[in-house]
Image: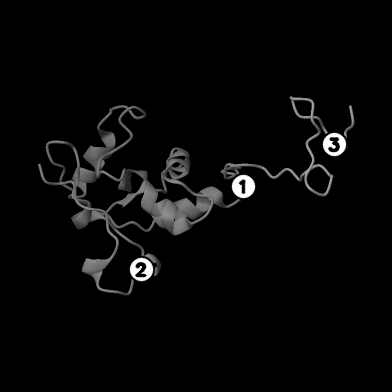
Amino acid sequence: MDTKHPRRSDGEKNVNAAGTAPATAPANVPPNVNAPGYNERVFEIVRRIPAGQVMTYGQLAEILGEGYTARTVGFVMNKSDESVPWHRVINAQGACSTGRVLLPMNKQQRLLEAEGIEFNTRDRCDLGRHRWTPEEARDDSDEADKNSQPSLFSE
């Protein structure tokens, strides 16, 4: 087989207009969650969340930027030690997402309630009231007009 011009499955050579094999770029390369400093960037922000306040996985990912998603932040939080108040990071609906991971299954919610965060009958807190944003990530415009998540606290 011609290694310079590999054949497609239909027998034709895979070449571009210049007659050479196209460069292959990795598609949707996942972030390297094992890269040095990747986890620590998440933990640095989470350590600053005040008692009685929360952040969402997606909010952290947005602040951290490229290479971070709500899901990867969740994976990172799973690796946190006792110096990180992991319980202060919740999902975008204002609910705890650790029920299937932790025993007892309501441990995260109990820790947050001990800090004064109230949950409704659907086990959601009022993000409009309890969501914390680091100062460096705050919009200088009118606080009421910032792109905040709507509250799902109403029953």
Determine whether, in the image, residue 112 is placed left or right of residue 35: left
- Rendered position, 100 above or below 86: above
Given residues 4 and 25, the one toward you in this image is 4
Judging by the rendered image, the residue that carries numbered circle 2 is: 135
Which mark is in front, 1 or 3? 3
Earlier residue among tags 2 and 3: 3
Q: Residue at x 69, y 45 (%)?
A: 25
Earlier residue among tags 1 and 2: 1
Residue 35 is labelled as: 1
Q: CA distance from mark 2 to mark 3?
A: 54 Å
Which mark is in front, 2 or 3? 3
Quadrant containing the N terminus in the rendered view: top right
At mark 2, the secondary structure is helix
Judging by the rendered image, the residue that carries numbered circle 3 is: 5
Determine whether, in the image, residue 102 is placed left or right of residue 155: right
Mark 2 touching mark 3, by CB under 8 A? no
